[in-house]
Image (cartoon, rainbow, N blue to C red):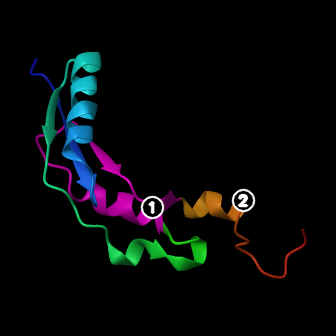
């Protein structure tokens, strides 16, 4: 059986030394091939000023699903940007529903 590959994809500016270290740790722990690919720009439509200037993780994940290389078993996206999940944002910091009882 061939050794599976995990692709590491930086989103935005991520230091190569960090990507290399993550890959080295994954390879050692799971005995998998690691491929670090060219970075992906942060999609401007994922920025949400209403949510404290964070980026919508769901939108980013949807775009990542389309970009996984066919030879790769899994893909790990690494970013330094501040992400939020719309589902959890409703429950923690941001009211999603107006005129509702509290």
Instruction: Say which quadrant the N terminus sits in.
Output: top left
Q: Name the residue under label 1.
A: 58
**Quadrant of res 7:** top left
Q: In x, y percent, where is residue 97?
A: 74, 76
50 inside magenta stretch: no
Taking the spot 54% from the left edge, 59% from the top edge, the residue there is 85
From the top left corner, tell me how far across and down residue 20 is, in percent.
20, 35
Closer to the camera in the image, 21 or 89:
21
- Image coordinates for residue 71, horizontal then vertical, percent: 11, 40
Answer few, some or many: residues within 10 Å of disc 2's Cα (few below 14, many 20 plus, some between 14 and 19).
few
- Secondary structure category for the residue under label 2: helix
Magenta span covers which residues? 55-84
96 shown above or below 28: below
Q: Name the residue under label 2.
A: 91
Quadrant of the frame with the C terminus: bottom right
Check the image and report above or below for 22 versus 75.
above
Q: Residue at x 24, y 17 (%)?
A: 28
């Amino acid at each position: 059986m061939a050794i599976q590959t995990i692709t590491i994809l930086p989103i935005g500016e991520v230091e190569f030394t960090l990507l290399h270290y993550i890959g080295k740790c994954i390879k050692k722990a799971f005995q998998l091939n690691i491929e670090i690919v060219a970075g992906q720009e942060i999609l401007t439509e994922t920025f949400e000023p209403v949510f404290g200037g964070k980026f919508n993780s769901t939108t980013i994940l949807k775009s990542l699903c389309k970009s996984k290389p066919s030879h790769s078993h899994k893909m790990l996206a690494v970013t330094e940007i501040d992400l939020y999940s719309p589902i959890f944002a409703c429950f923690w910091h941001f009211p999603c529903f107006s005129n509702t009882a509290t």
